[in-house]
Amino acid sequence: MNVARFYSTAWRVAGRVPGPLLRGMCNLAADVAWLRHGQGVRRLERNLARVRPELDVRALRRLSRRGMRSYMRYFGETFALRSMTQAQVDARVRAVYDPRLTDELDAGRTVLLALGHVGNWDLAGAYCTRALAPVTTVAERLEPEELFQEFVAFRESIGLRIFPLTGGGDVFRDLVRSARGGPGLLPLLADRDLTARGVEVDLFGHRARVAAGPAALAVTTGAMLMPTVVSYERLHGARRRAAGSPWGVLIEFLPPVEVPAGLPRADQVRAVTQGWVDSLAEGIAAHAEDWHMLQAVFVEDLDPARYAATLQAEGSVS
């Protein structure tokens, strides 16, 4: 199967498919994947078991089914996003934010956002880049290259400015420049470390490995860092009719994480990272079915030899 061609076709075709049919197809795909209980679904269940440790096996399976439906809903909406009108996007998105967000933007500064793979972050980005401030973010370099270029073209088409995580120069330097060039929003999906230069934190009482980027940028630039949670919510009445969907998303911009003074830089990065992770964890716990984490993020799930090598490279073998 040519994955890049499949995605390209989906982006061209999904917007022409009636909404109920598209949602039905996504639910069917989710249920088939859930019933097959492959590696991704099993990993999702292991992650969700940390979020909801009180659940028994049957309850956890029901939660993972809702999780797979949420995950496939994200793809269906994303494939159709370019065909949505501004009015439909506005109707689908509700934002709740700490007033310090708009204060910073009004003052001409960039605000850093630490996000997880929760809800539909692409829909949130399409809304925010028009309603709040220009959005700049990073895209993981996917294989094959055609697939990566499809994702970049899609995100640029909805108004986002994209830096490749790898293979495009010094991404951190580019982000520093962007963070100092506001006003703007700089969201980073950071609940999984993709660089082997991440930070080990406490997440739901377990050690986990997340990205260092949001905290490192906050420490380097002095820009405000706000943990942000995007989750699904049911729509009703006039808003549902305007959205053309029974589902919308809620964007919660949470209170900023302060950078502690008087500490070495590395300790500041660790402290700020744990701060945004704690806030994000509360959002994930409240919307566990919307956490689309089908990969290993907890240390006990990582390959021990590879993780030991990562720690050794950092000079911090314990």
Image: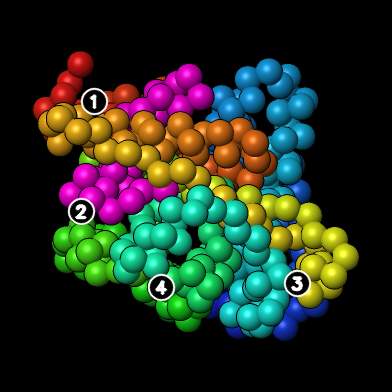
Q: Residue at x 59, y 28 (%)?
A: 51
- Residue that mark 4 sits on: 134
What separation in Å lies between label 3 and label 1 (alpha carbons)? 48 Å
* Between discs 1 and 4, the one toward the N terminus: 4
What separation in Å lies between label 1 and label 4 (alpha carbons)? 40 Å
Confirm or deny contact between disc 3 and disc 2 (CB under 8 A): no
- Residue that mark 2 sits on: 221
* Between discs 3 and 1, the one toward the N terminus: 3
The colouring scheme, among rainbow, by chain, secondary structure or one colour, is: rainbow
The magenta-colored residue range is: 198-226
Q: Kindly identify the amino acid type of the residue bearing the numbered disc 4.
A: Pro
Q: Residue at x 32, y 24 (%)?
A: 304
6 up-or-down from 60: above or below = below
- Coordinates of residue 97 in the picture (x, y in percent): 54, 53
* Between discs 1 and 2, the one toward the N terminus: 2
What separation in Å lies between label 4 and label 3 (alpha carbons)? 23 Å
Q: Secondary structure at mark 2?
A: helix
Q: Nearer the viewer, mark 4 or mark 3?
A: 4
- Residue that mark 1 sits on: 308
Image quadrant for the N terminus? bottom right
Q: Residue at x 73, y 43 (%)?
A: 66
What separation in Å lies between label 1 and label 2 (alpha carbons)? 31 Å
- Residue that mark 3 sits on: 243
- Coordinates of residue 43 in the picture (x, y in percent): 55, 35
Q: Kindly identify the amino acid type of the residue bearing the numbered disc 2.
A: Thr
